[in-house]
Image (spheres, rainbow, N blue to C red):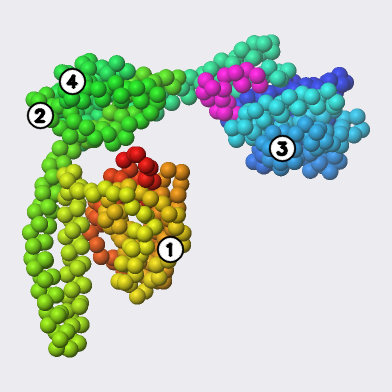
Amino acid sequence: MATTSKEFHVSSQTGQSDHFVQFYETDGFLIDSVSAFIGAGLRTGDAVIVLATKPHRESLEERLQGDGLEVAVARARGQYFSIDAAEALSGFMVDSSPEPGRFAEIVGSIIARAAQGGRHVRIFGEMVALLWAEENRAAALRLEELWSDLGKAYAFSLCCGYPMQGFGGEAYKEEFAEICQQHSRVLPAESYARLSSPDEHLRAITLLQQKAASLEAEIARRKRAEEALLHQVAIVESSDDAILSKDLEGIITSWNAAAARIYGYSAEEIVGRPVTLLFAPDRRDEFAQIMARIRRGERVDHFETLRVRKDGTRLTVSVTISPIKDSSGTIIGASAIARDMTERKELDKRKDEFISMASHELKTPLTSLKGFLGLLQRRLTTQADQQALHYLARMDAQVNRLTNLVNDLLDLSKIQTGQLDYQEERFELDALVQEALENVQGTTQTHHLLLEEQTGAEVFGDRDRIGQVLINLLNNAIKYSPRADRVLVRVAKDRNKALVCVQDFGIGIAKEHQHKLFERFYQVTNPGEKKTYPGLGIGLYISYQIVKRHGGRLWVESKKGEGATFRFTLPLFQEGKR
């Protein structure tokens, strides 16, 4: 065996308690050591208490049986107590910490039973090791203190067992030293178990073992960190986006392959030079603004701006900039990820030009078609041809729908070019809401449009454009609540703003779609839903831009399957202010 009974011998005549710790690297060594300690006690008539895990209790009893000791007989005569460590812990742990009174009552009563007849008590305990393995280190250290306190009331010899792998890392240095300090003797793991020296020598050897374990853990940690760094470098180098870093003065410290491709500078040319070399002359003030936010620990997300290539070509880029911190948390620089948006911007411009041209070309024949339909309707009315009038009414509805679509496309192109006209005037918001409700109510037989609240609010802006927003929201509420029969509208005042709410009881909008709802051409699609809804996804975008132009805000509150409430605000009219 690795440890002899002589090493564990404690005189039962001293009346003193002995609290020592055995560190181990393998379960086999632990069982060898503890069986020598327990076996020596059983042979000399001591009582034995084993507070351990089930595998260790079973292995220990098997070893004792192999050494010729009748464990069953010792248990029958009250000399051997085998208790599950986890169950014992559960009896006195309160809020993840051992409660002193319960501990003294539960464990003290076990020791008292074992000590009947004047027997000395030997204890092997793994409760502290279980707490340590659960990362509850404060509770483990507190439990060691409670054992020492209990030793003042009862005479016993206690051996605590800890696996050495539980102390791998520099973070455990102070706590490991405290554990050693709390025990009268410290027995090192099997690597040094056969050394014979004074207790202080043993403490020093054990501390050396802990340092070795810490060193191994640190080497493993650094290896993992190096592997993770290499992985990150590979990602950065393979990215299609320009990725660079700079210090707080703006000097470039790293530069990936995509940055070289986008900006035209090689890493050798640009690293060590100021990042403002990439800034357009009229955007140089951005650097100070961005770095001020970085120094405050803020992140700059998807900031669209202009940059300049080595050859002088201007680029439109979307930049995300984040602080870089050292190990102590101090901000030492910034990382920037830039995506070249030049080509997309050019495509968007061409698309807007096409939409504008196509809309204008469509509007002329539509106006003519609308006029001819009106003439036919008047002529057929005099002839009382009801079937023909029915078909003409359907045609007229489709022409109106197409006209609205063309108007929306025209508005879209004007918004993109900043040419959307606004006619500002003072008007009563309640009257406009009532007018919009009456107009839309005349087009639906499925829903009741209810105005619940009015305020007498007056606003200043383009009455027709705000009416356009209201009609769009009301039509959407009807369209997306096919199984409902009502739409609620409320007007309220909030300090210096008017608030309009349009609430439906329809299909609702999932959270993940809401932030994109006001983008151009965005339509919510549900893969599992067969029903489709007509439209190009521009009505909400136009409404959002109109409200924004008026100094207000448009947003949605919704849950999937629970309807949606669209709200927008407008500044109240104030005399003398425009």
Q: Earlier in the sequence, mark 1 or mark 4?
A: 4
Q: Please rate how many residues cluster around mark 3, counting C-alpha atoms within 10 Å: few if below 14, some from 14 to 19, many from 20.
A: some
Residue that mark 1 sits on: 451
Residue occupying the point 70% across, 19% down: 182
Q: Between marks 2 and 4, how big is the CA–CA gap?
A: 13 Å
- Residue type at tag 1: Leu
Amino acid at dot 4: Leu
> In this rendering, which labeled residue sits more in front, label 1 or label 4?
1
Marked residue nearer the N-terminal end (2 or 1): 2
**Amino acid residing under circle 3:** Met
Q: Nearer the viewer, residue 304 or 471?
A: 471
Looking at the image, residue 466 sits to the left or right of residue 499; the answer is: left
Instruction: Give the label on residue 536, or none.
Output: none
Q: Which residue is mark 3?
A: 93
Q: CA distance from mark 3 to mark 4?
A: 63 Å
* Local crowd size for mark 1, using a 10 Å CA cut-off: few (<14), some (14–19), many (≥20): some
Q: Which residues are magenta?
A: 163-179
Q: Is residue 174 magenta?
A: yes
Q: Nearer the viewer, mark 3 or mark 1?
A: 1
Tell me, yes or no, whether the two marked residues, 1 and 4, touch with CB atoms within 8 Å.
Answer: no
Check whether the beta carbons of the residues at disc 3 and disc 1 lie within 8 A of each other.
no
Numbered mark located on residue 277 in the image: 4
